[in-house]
Protein backbone atom coordinates (compact mmCIF):
# COMPACT_ATOMS: atom_id res chain seq x y z
CA UNK A 1 0.00 0.00 0.00
CA UNK A 2 1.61 3.27 -1.08
CA UNK A 3 -1.10 5.66 0.09
CA UNK A 4 -3.26 5.59 3.17
CA UNK A 5 -5.60 8.55 2.61
CA UNK A 6 -9.17 7.21 2.64
CA UNK A 7 -7.82 3.65 2.73
CA UNK A 8 -7.65 0.95 5.33
CA UNK A 9 -4.56 0.32 7.42
CA UNK A 10 -4.07 -2.77 9.54
CA UNK A 11 -2.79 -3.39 13.04
CA UNK A 12 0.68 -4.45 11.87
CA UNK A 13 1.17 -1.15 10.06
CA UNK A 14 -0.11 0.88 13.00
CA UNK A 15 1.98 -1.01 15.55
CA UNK A 16 5.17 -0.61 13.51
CA UNK A 17 4.45 3.08 12.84
CA UNK A 18 3.93 3.79 16.53
CA UNK A 19 7.04 1.83 17.53
CA UNK A 20 9.05 4.05 15.20
CA UNK A 21 7.34 7.17 16.55
CA UNK A 22 8.29 6.14 20.09
CA UNK A 23 11.86 5.25 19.05
CA UNK A 24 11.31 1.66 20.12
CA UNK A 25 12.73 -0.17 17.11
CA UNK A 26 16.22 -1.20 16.07
CA UNK A 27 15.24 -0.42 12.47
CA UNK A 28 16.13 3.24 13.09
CA UNK A 29 19.24 4.77 14.65
CA UNK A 30 18.93 5.29 18.39
CA UNK A 31 17.78 8.85 19.14
CA UNK A 32 19.53 11.21 21.47
CA UNK A 33 18.08 11.96 24.88
CA UNK A 34 16.20 15.05 23.71
CA UNK A 35 14.63 13.42 20.66
CA UNK A 36 13.44 10.55 22.85
CA UNK A 37 11.93 12.95 25.38
CA UNK A 38 10.35 15.09 22.66
CA UNK A 39 8.35 12.24 21.10
CA UNK A 40 5.60 12.09 23.73
CA UNK A 41 7.30 13.12 26.95
CA UNK A 42 7.86 10.57 29.71
CA UNK A 43 5.63 10.23 32.76
CA UNK A 44 7.77 10.16 35.88
CA UNK A 45 5.53 8.13 38.17
CA UNK A 46 6.48 6.38 40.26
CA UNK A 47 9.52 8.69 40.56
CA UNK A 48 12.36 7.30 38.48
CA UNK A 49 10.21 5.70 35.79
CA UNK A 50 10.59 8.68 33.46
CA UNK A 51 14.36 8.20 33.10
CA UNK A 52 13.79 4.45 32.58
CA UNK A 53 11.45 5.25 29.69
CA UNK A 54 14.20 7.39 28.16
CA UNK A 55 16.74 4.59 28.71
CA UNK A 56 14.47 2.19 26.80
CA UNK A 57 14.73 4.53 23.81
CA UNK A 58 18.39 5.49 24.20
CA UNK A 59 20.56 2.40 24.78
CA UNK A 60 23.65 3.36 26.76
CA UNK A 61 22.02 6.35 28.44
CA UNK A 62 23.22 6.92 32.00
CA UNK A 63 21.39 8.24 35.03
CA UNK A 64 24.07 10.94 35.33
CA UNK A 65 23.21 12.22 31.84
CA UNK A 66 19.55 12.57 32.77
CA UNK A 67 20.40 14.25 36.07
CA UNK A 68 22.73 16.66 34.31
CA UNK A 69 20.08 17.56 31.71
CA UNK A 70 17.50 18.23 34.44
CA UNK A 71 19.58 19.94 37.12
CA UNK A 72 22.62 21.47 35.43
CA UNK A 73 22.18 22.46 31.80
CA UNK A 74 18.36 22.31 32.24
CA UNK A 75 17.78 21.15 28.68
CA UNK A 76 15.15 18.82 30.11
CA UNK A 77 12.42 19.93 32.46
CA UNK A 78 9.84 18.19 34.61
CA UNK A 79 6.36 19.59 35.16
CA UNK A 80 2.80 18.55 35.90
CA UNK A 81 1.34 18.47 32.40
CA UNK A 82 -0.18 15.51 30.54
CA UNK A 83 -2.98 14.09 32.70
CA UNK A 84 -1.61 16.54 35.31
CA UNK A 85 1.15 14.01 36.00
CA UNK A 86 4.87 14.76 36.36
CA UNK A 87 6.31 14.59 32.85
CA UNK A 88 9.83 14.91 31.48
CA UNK A 89 10.31 16.69 28.15
CA UNK A 90 12.77 19.08 26.46
CA UNK A 91 12.74 22.55 27.97
CA UNK A 92 12.31 24.10 24.53
CA UNK A 93 9.03 22.19 24.24
CA UNK A 94 7.46 23.66 27.38
CA UNK A 95 4.77 25.50 25.35
CA UNK A 96 3.92 22.30 23.46
CA UNK A 97 3.42 20.27 26.64
CA UNK A 98 1.41 22.94 28.48
CA UNK A 99 -0.45 25.56 26.41
CA UNK A 100 -2.57 23.17 24.28
CA UNK A 101 -4.07 21.58 27.43
CA UNK A 102 -4.81 24.88 29.19
CA UNK A 103 -8.57 25.38 29.71
CA UNK A 104 -10.07 28.65 28.58
CA UNK A 105 -13.61 28.48 29.95
CA UNK A 106 -15.45 27.52 33.12
CA UNK A 107 -16.59 24.12 31.85
CA UNK A 108 -13.07 23.04 30.91
CA UNK A 109 -11.55 24.32 34.15
CA UNK A 110 -14.11 22.30 36.07
CA UNK A 111 -12.93 19.22 34.19
CA UNK A 112 -9.33 20.08 35.06
CA UNK A 113 -10.11 20.29 38.79
CA UNK A 114 -12.99 17.81 38.77
CA UNK A 115 -12.06 16.14 42.08
CA UNK A 116 -12.34 19.54 43.71
CA UNK A 117 -15.62 20.65 42.15
CA UNK A 118 -17.81 19.90 45.21
CA UNK A 119 -15.54 22.13 47.31
CA UNK A 120 -15.76 24.88 44.70
CA UNK A 121 -19.52 24.69 44.56
CA UNK A 122 -19.64 25.08 48.32
CA UNK A 123 -17.81 28.41 48.08
CA UNK A 124 -20.02 29.95 45.44
CA UNK A 125 -16.91 30.85 43.45
CA UNK A 126 -16.20 29.78 39.89
CA UNK A 127 -13.37 27.42 38.93
CA UNK A 128 -11.88 30.22 36.81
CA UNK A 129 -11.74 32.55 39.83
CA UNK A 130 -10.26 29.99 42.24
CA UNK A 131 -7.63 28.81 39.75
CA UNK A 132 -6.59 32.42 39.11
CA UNK A 133 -6.33 33.07 42.86
CA UNK A 134 -4.14 29.95 43.13
CA UNK A 135 -2.00 31.03 40.18
CA UNK A 136 -1.33 34.45 41.67
CA UNK A 137 -0.54 32.91 45.07
CA UNK A 138 1.90 30.39 43.56
CA UNK A 139 3.64 33.09 41.54
CA UNK A 140 4.21 35.08 44.73
CA UNK A 141 5.06 32.09 46.96
CA UNK A 142 7.74 30.83 44.57
CA UNK A 143 9.31 34.22 43.97
CA UNK A 144 12.93 33.54 44.91
CA UNK A 145 11.98 30.26 46.61
CA UNK A 146 12.18 26.55 45.80
CA UNK A 147 9.56 24.78 47.92
CA UNK A 148 8.52 21.20 48.58
CA UNK A 149 4.86 20.30 48.16
CA UNK A 150 4.20 20.64 51.89
CA UNK A 151 6.04 23.97 52.01
CA UNK A 152 4.09 25.20 49.03
CA UNK A 153 0.82 24.29 50.73
CA UNK A 154 1.79 26.32 53.81
CA UNK A 155 2.84 29.28 51.66
CA UNK A 156 -0.42 29.22 49.72
CA UNK A 157 -2.44 29.05 52.91
CA UNK A 158 -0.96 32.43 53.86
CA UNK A 159 -1.80 33.96 50.49
CA UNK A 160 -5.24 32.61 49.65
CA UNK A 161 -8.50 34.08 51.01
CA UNK A 162 -9.00 33.22 54.67
CA UNK A 163 -12.07 31.11 53.91
CA UNK A 164 -9.77 28.71 52.01
CA UNK A 165 -7.15 28.36 54.75
CA UNK A 166 -8.22 24.83 55.70
CA UNK A 167 -7.58 23.66 52.15
CA UNK A 168 -3.89 24.36 52.47
CA UNK A 169 -2.98 22.56 55.65
CA UNK A 170 0.13 20.53 54.71
CA UNK A 171 -1.52 17.11 54.69
CA UNK A 172 -4.69 18.34 53.03
CA UNK A 173 -2.77 20.14 50.29
CA UNK A 174 -0.44 17.22 49.61
CA UNK A 175 -3.25 14.72 49.25
CA UNK A 176 -6.08 16.79 47.84
CA UNK A 177 -5.89 20.52 47.23
CA UNK A 178 -2.73 20.16 45.12
CA UNK A 179 -5.11 19.51 42.22
CA UNK A 180 -5.45 23.30 42.00
CA UNK A 181 -1.68 23.67 41.65
CA UNK A 182 -1.58 20.89 39.06
CA UNK A 183 -4.10 22.82 36.99
CA UNK A 184 -2.04 26.01 37.31
CA UNK A 185 1.03 24.10 36.08
CA UNK A 186 -0.58 24.05 32.63
CA UNK A 187 0.15 27.78 32.40
CA UNK A 188 3.88 26.95 32.45
CA UNK A 189 4.34 29.14 35.54
CA UNK A 190 6.35 26.62 37.55
CA UNK A 191 8.26 23.37 37.17
CA UNK A 192 9.37 20.49 39.38
CA UNK A 193 12.93 21.23 40.44
CA UNK A 194 15.29 18.37 41.37
CA UNK A 195 17.09 18.98 44.64
CA UNK A 196 19.70 16.55 45.93
CA UNK A 197 18.54 14.72 49.03
CA UNK A 198 15.12 16.40 49.14
CA UNK A 199 11.66 15.48 47.97
CA UNK A 200 10.21 16.91 44.80
CA UNK A 201 10.25 20.69 44.93
CA UNK A 202 8.82 23.48 42.84
CA UNK A 203 10.33 26.59 41.31
CA UNK A 204 9.06 29.35 39.07
CA UNK A 205 10.00 28.49 35.52
CA UNK A 206 11.64 31.83 34.74
CA UNK A 207 13.77 31.70 37.88
CA UNK A 208 14.67 28.01 37.54
CA UNK A 209 15.85 28.54 33.96
CA UNK A 210 17.38 31.92 34.73
CA UNK A 211 15.77 33.38 31.64
CA UNK A 212 12.43 33.96 30.01
CA UNK A 213 10.67 30.63 29.36
CA UNK A 214 10.39 29.46 25.74
CA UNK A 215 7.35 30.77 23.90
CA UNK A 216 5.15 29.68 21.01
CA UNK A 217 1.87 31.18 19.93
CA UNK A 218 -1.17 29.23 21.05
CA UNK A 219 -2.09 28.09 17.51
CA UNK A 220 1.49 26.96 16.79
CA UNK A 221 1.71 25.10 20.10
CA UNK A 222 -1.60 23.35 19.45
CA UNK A 223 -0.56 22.28 15.97
CA UNK A 224 2.69 20.85 17.22
CA UNK A 225 0.95 19.14 20.15
CA UNK A 226 -1.39 17.29 17.78
CA UNK A 227 1.46 16.41 15.42
CA UNK A 228 3.51 14.91 18.28
CA UNK A 229 0.51 12.99 19.54
CA UNK A 230 -0.29 11.53 16.12
CA UNK A 231 3.31 10.56 15.44
CA UNK A 232 3.35 8.57 18.68
CA UNK A 233 -0.27 7.33 18.82
CA UNK A 234 -1.71 7.78 15.33
CA UNK A 235 -3.87 7.16 13.54
CA UNK A 236 -6.22 8.46 16.19
CA UNK A 237 -9.16 10.72 17.00
CA UNK A 238 -9.75 13.95 18.96
CA UNK A 239 -11.64 11.92 21.57
CA UNK A 240 -8.59 9.76 22.20
CA UNK A 241 -6.39 12.85 22.29
CA UNK A 242 -8.56 14.25 25.10
CA UNK A 243 -8.34 10.98 27.04
CA UNK A 244 -4.56 10.76 26.59
CA UNK A 245 -4.03 14.38 27.62
CA UNK A 246 -6.50 14.19 30.51
CA UNK A 247 -8.32 17.27 29.35
CA UNK A 248 -11.86 18.17 28.29
CA UNK A 249 -13.19 17.30 24.86
CA UNK A 250 -13.58 21.05 24.29
CA UNK A 251 -9.89 21.75 24.90
CA UNK A 252 -8.81 18.78 22.77
CA UNK A 253 -11.15 19.81 19.96
CA UNK A 254 -9.60 23.28 19.89
CA UNK A 255 -6.13 21.79 19.53
CA UNK A 256 -7.36 19.39 16.87
CA UNK A 257 -9.02 22.19 14.93
CA UNK A 258 -5.76 24.16 14.91
CA UNK A 259 -4.12 21.28 13.06
CA UNK A 260 -7.13 20.24 10.97
CA UNK A 261 -5.74 21.42 7.64
CA UNK A 262 -2.63 19.25 8.19
CA UNK A 263 -4.50 15.99 8.89
CA UNK A 264 -5.53 13.16 6.57
CA UNK A 265 -8.27 10.60 7.10
CA UNK A 266 -7.39 6.93 7.53
CA UNK A 267 -9.67 3.95 8.10
CA UNK A 268 -8.45 1.85 11.00
CA UNK A 269 -10.24 -0.80 13.03
CA UNK A 270 -13.51 -0.05 11.29
CA UNK A 271 -13.59 3.66 12.05
CA UNK A 272 -12.40 6.97 10.64
CA UNK A 273 -9.17 8.14 12.22
CA UNK A 274 -6.54 10.70 11.29
CA UNK A 275 -2.82 10.94 10.71
CA UNK A 276 -0.63 13.99 10.15
CA UNK A 277 0.01 14.57 6.47
CA UNK A 278 3.78 14.48 7.04
CA UNK A 279 3.47 10.92 8.33
CA UNK A 280 0.93 9.29 6.05
CA UNK A 281 3.56 7.66 3.83
CA UNK A 282 5.44 6.39 6.86
CA UNK A 283 2.19 4.80 8.07
CA UNK A 284 1.71 3.14 4.70
CA UNK A 285 5.16 1.53 4.83
CA UNK A 286 6.60 1.80 8.34
CA UNK A 287 9.99 0.33 9.23
CA UNK A 288 9.74 -3.15 10.67
CA UNK A 289 9.47 -3.09 14.46
CA UNK A 290 12.61 -4.93 15.51
CA UNK A 291 14.44 -5.39 18.76
CA UNK A 292 13.96 -5.98 22.47
CA UNK A 293 12.84 -3.24 24.84
CA UNK A 294 12.28 -3.32 28.61
CA UNK A 295 9.75 -0.58 29.40
CA UNK A 296 8.85 0.66 32.88
CA UNK A 297 5.33 0.83 34.23
CA UNK A 298 3.48 3.88 32.87
CA UNK A 299 5.82 4.12 29.89
CA UNK A 300 4.48 6.44 27.15
CA UNK A 301 3.93 3.36 24.95
CA UNK A 302 1.39 2.07 27.45
CA UNK A 303 -0.71 5.25 27.40
CA UNK A 304 -2.26 4.60 24.01
CA UNK A 305 -6.06 4.65 24.23
CA UNK A 306 -6.82 1.80 21.80
CA UNK A 307 -5.18 -0.82 23.99
CA UNK A 308 -6.07 -3.72 21.72
CA UNK A 309 -3.58 -2.36 19.19
CA UNK A 310 -0.71 -2.97 21.59
CA UNK A 311 -2.19 -6.03 23.31
CA UNK A 312 -4.75 -7.90 21.15
CA UNK A 313 -5.37 -10.49 23.87
CA UNK A 314 -7.88 -8.64 26.04
CA UNK A 315 -7.42 -11.19 28.82
CA UNK A 316 -4.00 -9.60 29.43
CA UNK A 317 -5.33 -6.04 29.75
CA UNK A 318 -6.09 -6.35 33.46
CA UNK A 319 -2.52 -7.53 34.04
CA UNK A 320 -0.87 -4.75 32.01
CA UNK A 321 -3.19 -1.91 33.04
CA UNK A 322 -4.10 -2.35 36.69
CA UNK A 323 -5.82 0.18 38.92
CA UNK A 324 -2.56 0.57 40.85
CA UNK A 325 0.86 -1.02 40.78
CA UNK A 326 1.23 -1.64 37.06
CA UNK A 327 4.07 -3.90 35.92
CA UNK A 328 6.68 -2.97 33.37
CA UNK A 329 6.56 -4.73 30.02
CA UNK A 330 9.02 -6.33 27.63
CA UNK A 331 8.49 -5.74 23.90
CA UNK A 332 9.96 -8.05 21.31
CA UNK A 333 9.68 -6.71 17.76
CA UNK A 334 6.92 -4.38 18.92
CA UNK A 335 4.79 -7.11 20.53
CA UNK A 336 4.21 -7.73 24.22
CA UNK A 337 6.49 -10.59 25.27
CA UNK A 338 6.61 -10.40 29.08
CA UNK A 339 5.70 -8.47 32.22
CA UNK A 340 8.28 -7.53 34.83
CA UNK A 341 8.60 -6.19 38.33
CA UNK A 342 11.65 -5.24 40.34
CA UNK A 343 12.65 -4.94 43.97
CA UNK A 344 15.84 -3.80 45.62
CA UNK A 345 17.82 -5.94 48.01
CA UNK A 346 20.79 -3.97 49.20
CA UNK A 347 22.74 -2.93 46.13
CA UNK A 348 21.11 -5.57 43.93
CA UNK A 349 18.08 -5.01 41.72
CA UNK A 350 16.07 -8.19 41.37
CA UNK A 351 13.80 -8.43 38.33
CA UNK A 352 11.06 -11.02 38.08
CA UNK A 353 10.04 -11.53 34.47
CA UNK A 354 6.76 -13.25 33.62
CA UNK A 355 6.64 -14.31 29.95
CA UNK A 356 3.32 -14.02 28.12
CA UNK A 357 4.79 -15.70 25.04
CA UNK A 358 7.72 -18.03 24.54
CA UNK A 359 11.07 -16.37 25.15
CA UNK A 360 14.08 -17.58 23.19
CA UNK A 361 17.50 -17.94 24.76
CA UNK A 362 18.58 -14.75 23.00
CA UNK A 363 15.56 -12.94 24.45
CA UNK A 364 16.44 -13.98 27.99
CA UNK A 365 20.04 -12.96 27.56
CA UNK A 366 18.91 -9.62 26.11
CA UNK A 367 16.56 -8.98 29.02
CA UNK A 368 19.34 -9.77 31.50
CA UNK A 369 21.62 -7.28 29.75
CA UNK A 370 18.94 -4.57 29.75
CA UNK A 371 18.23 -5.26 33.43
CA UNK A 372 21.89 -4.58 34.16
CA UNK A 373 21.51 -1.21 32.41
CA UNK A 374 18.47 -0.41 34.57
CA UNK A 375 20.21 -1.19 37.87
CA UNK A 376 22.20 2.10 38.16
CA UNK A 377 19.01 4.08 37.57
CA UNK A 378 17.67 2.41 40.72
CA UNK A 379 20.79 3.07 42.74
CA UNK A 380 22.01 -0.53 42.42
CA UNK A 381 25.36 -1.98 41.45
CA UNK A 382 24.02 -5.05 39.66
CA UNK A 383 20.86 -6.84 38.59
CA UNK A 384 19.62 -10.37 38.98
CA UNK A 385 16.86 -11.66 36.71
CA UNK A 386 14.44 -14.47 37.47
CA UNK A 387 12.08 -15.83 34.80
CA UNK A 388 8.78 -16.97 36.26
CA UNK A 389 7.89 -19.57 33.62
Image (cartoon, rainbow, N blue to C red):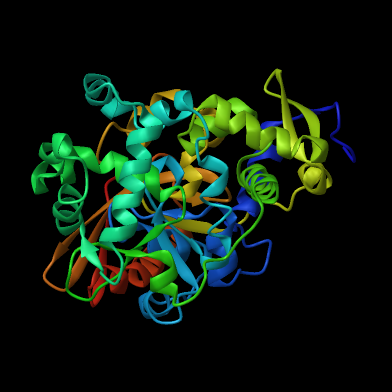
Q: Is residue 117 left or right of residue 245?
A: left
- Which residue lies most toward the right here? 2
Q: Which residue is found at the position 50% from the left and 55% from the top?
A: 41
Asked if residue 193 is positioned above or below residue 235 in the image, the reply reads: below
Asked if residue 94 is positioned above or below residue 130 in the image, the reply reads: below
- Which residue lies most toward the front here? 162
Quarter of the rendering containing residue 12: top right
Q: Is the C terminus in the top left, top right, bottom left or bottom right quadrant?
A: top left
Q: Which residue is found at the position 19% from the left and 37% from the top?
A: 176
Front residue (pair 376, 38): 38
Res 326 visible: no
Residue 109: x and y in percent read: 43, 31
Q: Is the N terminus in the top left, top right, bottom left or bottom right quadrant?
A: top right
Front residue (pair 235, 357): 235
Residue 46: x and y in percent read: 28, 52
Q: Which residue is found at the position 75% from the left and 48% from the top?
A: 286
Q: Is residue 109 left or right of residue 148?
A: right
Residue 105: x and y in percent read: 50, 29
Residue 63: x and y in percent read: 36, 75
Quarter of the rendering containing residue 130: top left
Res 280 visible: yes
Front residue (pair 234, 317): 234
Q: Tell me how many marks there are.
A: 0
Amino acid sequence: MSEVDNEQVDREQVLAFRAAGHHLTDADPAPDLWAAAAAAGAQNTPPGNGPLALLARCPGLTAAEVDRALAEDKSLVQAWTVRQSPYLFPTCDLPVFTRPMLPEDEESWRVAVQGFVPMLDGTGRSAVEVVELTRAAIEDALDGQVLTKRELGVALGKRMPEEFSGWFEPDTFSSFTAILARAVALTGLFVIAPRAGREASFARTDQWLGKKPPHRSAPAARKEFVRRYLRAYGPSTPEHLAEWAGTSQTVAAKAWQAAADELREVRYDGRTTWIHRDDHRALAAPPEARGLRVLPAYDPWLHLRDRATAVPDRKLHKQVWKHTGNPGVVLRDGELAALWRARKKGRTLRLTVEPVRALRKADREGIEKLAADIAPFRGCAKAETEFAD
